[in-house]
Image (cartoon, rainbow, N blue to C red):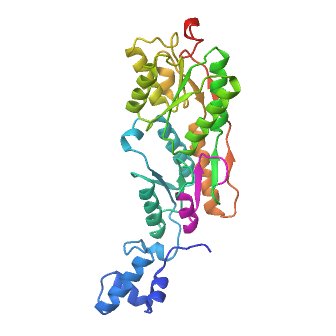
């Protein structure tokens, strides 16, 4: 059974009082006894109804606002080009429909879920965009319980009844390993994002399967929080090994640039002694020297398509909005080359 937002009538019915009594109690006005007021407030609390909700929450009117909650450290997001392009694309799709974007950064998934509940019960948004899909994601059943329109940005497969817009991360990662192996690399390292994310697991699976298929040594992956400092530390770890990798794949551009800096600091020539590949492809990869080989996808269009999918669902909850976008393709630049014969 779909769960709708609690209304003033729901509170009145459960508390056994009139609609007017509920209004008096929740707005701090005289007209009800203190005992009745306390009972009404407790019922409102049980129903997750906020006394500060806008008046439209009682009528279920649309807000023309879409929500986006990001559970990552704010300092990491501030230097992450992927998110700026994604949000720009989302905003472009919403602006064309005269819909606003409300964004909030929180610490973890529990805080994210609490934000969804509050936004929905207070009628702050008409729907939400879900990013950073996790394995056995706890957010999905909550959104379904609330009957809250939502679209998953990324992540193939089933997500309850939620639609998704995605590109094939697995196939993209396979193309990177195939390329590196084809030009002679056998010792490949990988600096990943958070291991709990579904797209991280897809990339790890692709690496393991590709190494087995191509007869390569196991590819070591070092997890990080996607930040430049973590990417630098992971690069130093891999390059300090006795048999260091001749190529490293990074899960975002910021870490790839940090890795390039560490290689330079350690007097390891790129690409002569180390090839570098990034999973994203922002302006950063083209402006650095050497320019970084990257998987190129249209992140702006990705965000645009996500927003359009969510607007379709809000307009028609029965609409089919899931969409697979083209797989990112490898743009080969100056940061990759065949390894030195002595390093193979």
Q: Quadrant of the N terminus?
A: bottom right
Q: Is residue 223 above or below residue 8?
A: above
Q: Residue 2's x, y, as percent?
A: 60, 72
Q: Is residue 166 left or right of residue 77?
A: right
On the image, the x and y values in percent for residue 232 come to: 40, 27
| The one of 311 and 341 positioned closer to us in this rendering | 341
Magenta segment includes 19: no
Residue 104 % position (x, y):
41, 53
Residue at 60% in and 42% down: 302
Please name whichever residue, 255 or 9, is drawn nearer the observer in this view of the structure.
255
Image side of residue 200 versus residue 215, left or right:
left
Q: Which residues are magenta?
A: 139-158
Q: How many marks?
A: 0
On the rendered image, what quadrant is the C terminus found in?
Answer: top right
Quarter location, residue 281: top right
Q: Residue at x 46, y 23 (%)?
A: 238
Q: Position of residue 23 (x, y in %)?
A: 38, 84
Work out which residue is located at the far top of the displayed protein and give it.
Answer: 341
Q: Decide which of 238, 306 is in the foreground and name it.
A: 238
Residue 141, magenta (yes or no): yes
> Residue shown at 39%/77% (left/top)?
45
Vertical placement of 31 versus 338: above or below? below
Q: Is residue 291 above or below residue 118?
A: above
Q: Residue at x 54, y 31 (%)?
A: 280
**In the rendered image of this protein, does residue 29 appear above or below residue 204?**
below
């Amino acid at each position: 059974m779909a769960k709708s937002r609690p209304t003033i009538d729901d509170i009145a019915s459960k508390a056994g009082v009139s609609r007017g009594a509920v209004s008096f109690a929740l707005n701090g006005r005289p007209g009800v006894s203190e005992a009745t007021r306390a009972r009404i407030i407790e019922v409102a609390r049980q129903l997750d109804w906020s006394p500060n909700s806008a008046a439209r929450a009682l009528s279920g009117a649309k807000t023309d606002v879409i929500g986006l909650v990001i559970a990552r450290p704010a300092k990491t997001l501030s230097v992450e080009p992927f998110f700026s392009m994604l949000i720009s694309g989302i905003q472009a799709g919403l602006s064309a429909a005269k819909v606003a974007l409300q964004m909030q950064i929180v610490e973890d998934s529990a805080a994210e879920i609490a934000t969804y509940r509050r936004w929905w019960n207070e009628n702050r948004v008409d729907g939400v965009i879900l990013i950073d899909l996790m394995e056995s994601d706890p957010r999905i059943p909550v959104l379904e319980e609330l009957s809250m329109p939502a679209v998953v940005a990324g992540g193939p497969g089933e997500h309850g009844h939620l639609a998704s817009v995605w590109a094939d991360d697995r196939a993209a990662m396979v193309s990177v390993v195939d390329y590196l192996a084809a030009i002679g690399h056998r010792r490949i390292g990988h600096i990943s994002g958070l291991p709990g994310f579904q797209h991280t697991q897809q990339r790890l699976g692709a690496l393991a399967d590709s190494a087995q298929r191509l007869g390569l040594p196991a590819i070591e992956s070092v997890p990080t929080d996607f930040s430049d400092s973590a990417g630098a530390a992971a690069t130093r770890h891999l390059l300090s090994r006795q048999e260091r990798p001749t190529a490293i794949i990074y899960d975002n551009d910021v870490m790839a640039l940090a890795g390039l800096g560490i290689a330079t600091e350690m007097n390891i020539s790129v690409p002569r002694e180390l090839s570098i590949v990034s999973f994203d492809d922002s302006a950063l990869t083209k402006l650095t020297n050497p320019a970084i080989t990257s998987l190129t996808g249209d992140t702006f269009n990705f965000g645009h398509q996500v927003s359009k999918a969510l607007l379709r669902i809000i307009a028609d909850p029965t609409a089919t909005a899931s969409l697979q976008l083209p797989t990112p393709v490898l743009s080969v630049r100056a940061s990759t080359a065949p390894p030195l014969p002595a390093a193979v």
